[in-house]
Amino acid sequence: MSSSLCIQGLTASVGGKEILRGIDLEVGAGQVHAVMGPNGSGKSTLAHVLMGRPGYEVTGGSVTIDGVELLGLATWERAQAGLFLALQYPVEVPGVSMADALEEAVAAAGGDRRDVVERLAAEAVRVGQDPAILRRAINVDMSGGEKKRNETLQLGVLRPRFAVLDEIDSGLDVDALRMVSSRVEAATTEFGLGVLAITHYSRLLNELHPDVVHVLARGRIVDTGGPDMATELERTGYAAYGGDTEEPVTGAGGAGDPAAGGDPFADPLA
């Protein structure tokens, strides 16, 4: 039986305001599903709700991996169940190297920590990351592109069943985008990774080829199509689908903006 990430009737609110109004989609092993939509439509809210970010209240629905309910589980439990989130704004972790963090994560999942350093070095080559960065504190004093490569490194070492990519293309130049996208796409065949890629632009999907494209607007999936839909949306925009600004803004000096010293997993209302 093929593995699947199944989202059914998912509703969620922040501060009493409903943001997600019934999300239904299913990602199979080895598939790439893209979620696109206007600003404020609920895309990043969907990513954070799936991974269990504090401050978001799930008011209905179900999220399962192979029948195992994730809602109600702690974030680390969702990770051990096979879910991975590549953050739009990767968090800095002073005093902890990538190798240290991944050794603990692998050991917690029952793996052999002795394999991590070798796997990490191999993944660094695949995404074009400077090996010296791996000895530094995670994401501290790094460029946006280096942080996004770090997210992809973690995915390659941890080998989750499903990855949610929240605008992994932001902060990447053309060459970095190609390497990161190619690594993620290779994972769909190497270990059957299922991908839910959240993005505004089709440039990511020129490299990470989607099987299905969904349009998220006003908290709902309002349209679904094939790979060509991404190119069409780039040409026409989202005016036909409407949009709003109800989604909490965490990238402009808010609680979740690292540029402002914030924590991406902090309560967005703090």
Image: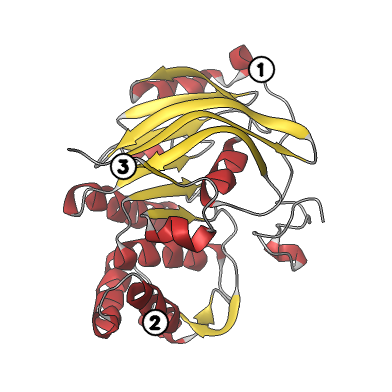
Mark 3 vs 2, N-terminal side: 3
Question: Residue 198, percent across and down?
Answer: 49, 40
What crowding class fits label 1: few (fewer than 14 Cα within 10 Å), some (14-19), or many (20 or more)? few
Which numbered mark, 1 or 3, is in the foreground of this view? Answer: 3
In the rendered image of this protein, does residue 239 appear above or below residue 12? above
Mark 2, mark 1: which one is toward the viewer? Answer: 2
The colour scheme is: secondary structure
Tell me which corner region of the image, top left, top right, bottom left or bottom right, holds residue 231.
top left
198 horizontally vs 14: left or right? left
Residue drawn at (60%, 15%), measured in percent from left and top? 241
Callout 2 amino acid? Ala
- Is disc 3 placed on a helix, strand or loop? loop
Q: Amino acid at mark 3?
A: Asp
Identify the residue under disc 1.
242
Residue appearing at x 42%, y 64% in the figure: 149
Quadrant where the image shows the N terminus: top left
| 118 versus 6 height, above or below | below
3 or 2: mark nearer the eye: 3
Q: CA distance from mark 2 to mark 1?
A: 44 Å
Asked if the residues shown at circle 1 and circle 3 are in contact, with their CB atoms under 8 angstroms apart, the answer is no
- Determine the secondary structure under disc 1: loop
**Would you identify the image quadrant in which residue 118 lies?**
bottom left
Which residue corresponds to the image point at 25% horizontal and 53% vertical from the top-left? 187
Amino acid at circle 1: Gly
As measured in the structure, the alpha-carbon distance from the residue carrying label 3 to the one carrying label 2 is: 30 Å
Q: Which residue is mark 2?
A: 99
Residue for badge 3? 66
